[in-house]
Image (cartoon, grey):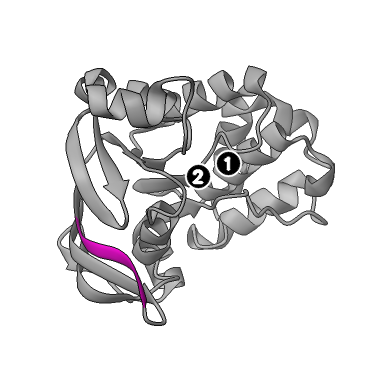
Amino acid sequence: MLKISKVETFYGKIQALRGVDIDVNDGEIVSLIGSNGAGKSTLLMTISGVNKAKNGEIIFNGEKIQNQEPHKIVNLGISQVPEGRRIFSRLTVEENLRLGAYINEKGKFFSDDIKEVYDLFPVLNDRKTQRGGTLSGGEQQMLAIGRALMSKPKVLLLDEPSLGIAPKLVNQIFASIKNINRKKNVTIFLVEQNAKKALELADRAYVLVNGKVTIEGPGQDLLKNKDIQAAYLEGGSKN
């Protein structure tokens, strides 16, 4: 479904991605782990068209999308939940979700779609008239995910969904991600600081080091890899 081939991205003269090759197949959960500064978020922003790839190809359902405008990429069926959530803090929960639905025939199916989000995250229904900025970190993350789902994506890009979330809510967020994948048939590409959780959830996973993929394989195999255990799992994630 999504093929990233030899992608290179720069910030000025600084190279952030170095010939990255990643495949995300239809229906999978694929995780990407790596230390801070490895280029994980840069890759997601490059897929979304916010950052521009200097070299390489990004192919989605057979169409080359590298360097297309972000709104066109969303229209094709790729939605991103950015690091730090980036909800509209002055808008209500429902207004945030309505903005996510805009491209979906300009909200034609809003009532049905928002019900699905409220079924997935009941707390958002309880808070629907509340301003986004007054929600807890976990609730804001649920809102950010719900907003992305309102566009009916085929692929959901998740950037550090556990970042800044109370530990008791992390399991709930990850259970929701699995539910979105399995029950709603949304393919997931997950960047996550909690390497253990990311690998446990993943069908397949990649490790990014200094902008380059160094290891790939089934999530369960990477969990057992001694190098990965030493770098990312022992004593907790070091991402």
Q: Position of residue 120 (x, y in %)?
A: 57, 27
Q: Which residue is drawn at 30% across and 49% down?
A: 209
Residue 201: image location, x then y, percent: 36, 24
Residue at (44%, 48%) from the top-left corner?
152
How far across and how far down the image is residue 205, in percent?
Answer: 26, 35
User: For the point 79% across and 55% down, which residue is it?
Assistant: 91
Q: Which of 34 and 2 is in front in this view?
A: 34
Residue 160 in view of the camera: yes
Per the rendering, the mark at residue 146 is 1
Between 25 and 114, the one nearer to me in the picture = 25
Quarter-of-image position of residue 59: bottom left
Q: In this figure, which residue is indicated by the disc labeled 2?
A: 149
Say how many tags the image has. Answer: 2
- Name the residue at 40% across, 24% down: 233
Vertical comparison of 50 with 171: above or below: below
Q: Which of 14 and 4 is in front in this view?
A: 14
Q: In which quarter of the image is residue 61?
A: bottom left
Comparing 78 with 150, the one in front is: 78
Looking at the image, do the residues carrying marks 1 and 2 touch, with CB atoms under 8 Å apart? yes
Q: Is the magenta stretch mostly helix, strand or loop?
A: strand
Magenta region: which residues?
14-20
Res. 25 in view? no
> Element type at marker 2?
helix
Left or right position of 225 against 77: left
Q: What residue type is labelled 1?
A: Gly
Identity of the amino acid at label 2? Leu
Percent across and percent down for residue 180 are: 43, 31
Dot 1 lies on which element? helix
Q: In this view, does 115 lie to the left or right of 71?
A: right
Left or right position of 198 against 145: left
Q: Mark 1 to mark 2: distance in Å?
A: 5 Å
Which of the 4 image quadrants contains residue 140? Answer: top right
